[in-house]
Image (tube, rainbow, N blue to C red):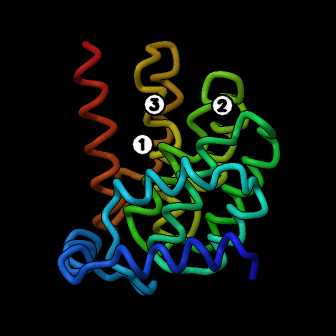
Amino acid sequence: MSIQLKEIQSILKAKATPEAKAAHEKFVPGTKEKIYGVKMPVLNELAQQFKAGGFELVEELWNAGALEEKALAVKMLGKIAKKDPERSLKLIQLFAKNIGNWAICDAMGMQGLKPILKTHQKEIFALAWKYNSSKDLWQRRLSLVLVEWYTRVRSLHPEIKKLVKNLENDDEYYVKKAIVWIKKNFAKEK
């Protein structure tokens, strides 16, 4: 365990509150990960403070496994993804094997690769297609969340609609919610 991870864990323990833990448990039901009980603004500050720890710290945080550690890993990845887009894409694939809730799924899809959305559209859509037929519900949700930003680009609507169509009969609540979200985005564009 790195010194930086120990320092982050110490800060997470110090900043944790029972109220924040209860809020996480309420808004992210079914989470199997440990929850410290730290508010998002604190995680945003930590992401900024520790981004120099680079990809190694991002991976170490993810592997530490608590909800806030995973969220922090994804937030930090979003700050450094441009430095090595290929490595960032590989980390998202590694992380996608172990998503346990909608909050981490959505952070991965919306924050982790944000700096490379315009430069690596082809690769991001390839990931979306890869996860679109997964047996894992979070990977299926991720397939839509990864392309959510692209709903702003009218020329990409047909491809996004194909991803949505493949999942329209999905039984999972959180996949259905992602479909509704994407469709609402399309409605805004009209």
- Name which residue lies at 45% across and 70% down: 68
Residue 83 higher or lower than 152, as above or below: below
Disc on res. 91: none
Query: Badge 3: few (under 14), some or many (20 or more) residues near its Cα, within 10 Å?
Result: some
Name the side, left or right, on which 65 lies relative to 182: right
Query: Badge 2: few (under 14), some or many (20 or more) residues near its Cα, within 10 Å?
Result: many
Quickly name the residue at label 2.
116
| Whole-number angstrom distance, CA of label 2 to CA of label 1 | 26 Å
Q: Mark yes or no: residue 179 visible.
A: yes
User: Which secondary structure, mark 2?
Assistant: helix
Which kind of residue does numbered mark 3 sit on?
Answer: Trp
N-terminal label among 3 and 1: 3
Name the side, left or right, on which 165 lies relative to 118: left
N-terminal label among 2 and 3: 2
Discs 2/3, front? 2
- State the residue in front, 143 or 89: 89
Which kind of residue does numbered mark 2 sit on?
Answer: Ile
Residue 114 higher or lower than 93, as above or below: above
Quickly name the residue at label 1.
165
| Whole-number angstrom distance, CA of label 2 to CA of label 3 | 12 Å
Quickly name the residue at label 3.
149
Image coords of residue 66 (percent x, y)? 50, 80
